[in-house]
Amino acid sequence: MYAFCVESSHRTLRVTLLALFAINLSFAYLFLLDPAVLSRVYGEVMLDNMHLFLSMSFGSLLVALAIGAFLAFLNPVKNATIVLLLIIAYFSLFLTDVVTLARSQMSVATLLPEMAYYLAIATLLIRFFPTQDHKKEEKEEVIPETETDPLEAVTEPLPTEPATEKKS
């Protein structure tokens, strides 16, 4: 059986990462292949070449974040750095929305659901950040004591052999 089915110590994090994977892929589809829907959501933004380019760029970023979420879903402890990357990415997207809101570039009604989503995902990932498996308890390594100290053997003078007399 797969490791993600057997271990239940990180079940909530795995559910969060799997949901994040699905949500990222669905939004990536919208940004990459159907930007007209997003244009209507964000208030009939004109879709010129620059906006289409930025939409496709953000869609590509979402595909990469979805792949990262899926890899972290498979083994959260081993891929804890990917989870950390996802936390940083979503928190920085939240800060981008805060700056956009502070500059009055978009309305609060448009940005508030997006900001809540980014902050909720970052908070969930921080709350359930993977630590070491509970099953693997740290055991202290016991070094067996030796009868003689290895350093003493190196620092002791070499034994001298008794001089043997030469017979002529």
Image (cartoon, grey):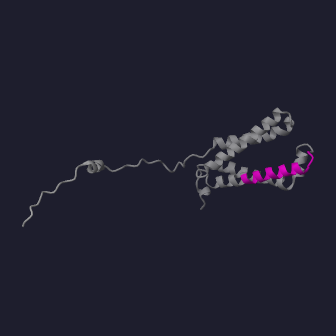
Q: How far across and how far down the image is residue 119, in percent?
A: 73, 39
Residue reaching furthest to the left: 168
Residue reaching furthest to the front: 168
| Residue 120 is at least partly visible in this image | no
Instruction: Please identify the dominant SS of the magenta region.
Output: helix
Q: Is residue 168 above or below residue 145?
A: below
Residue occupying image coordinates x 68% and y 40%: 123
Quadrant housing the C terminus: bottom left
Q: How far across and how far down the image is residue 49, in percent?
A: 89, 51
Residue occupying image coordinates x 79% and y 38%: 97
129 or 105, which is in the foreground? 105
Residue reaching furthest to the bottom: 168
Q: Which residues are magenta?
A: 45-64
Q: How far across and how far down the image is residue 87, in percent?
A: 68, 43
| Residue 64 is at least partly visible in this image | yes
Q: As drawn, is 76 to the left or to the right of 48? A: left
Q: Is residue 107 above or below residue 53?
A: above
115 or 127, which is in the foreground? 115
21 or 51, which is in the foreground? 51
Residue 10 magenta: no
Residue occupying image coordinates x 85% and y 51%: 53
Q: As drawn, is 107 to the left or to the right of 138? A: right
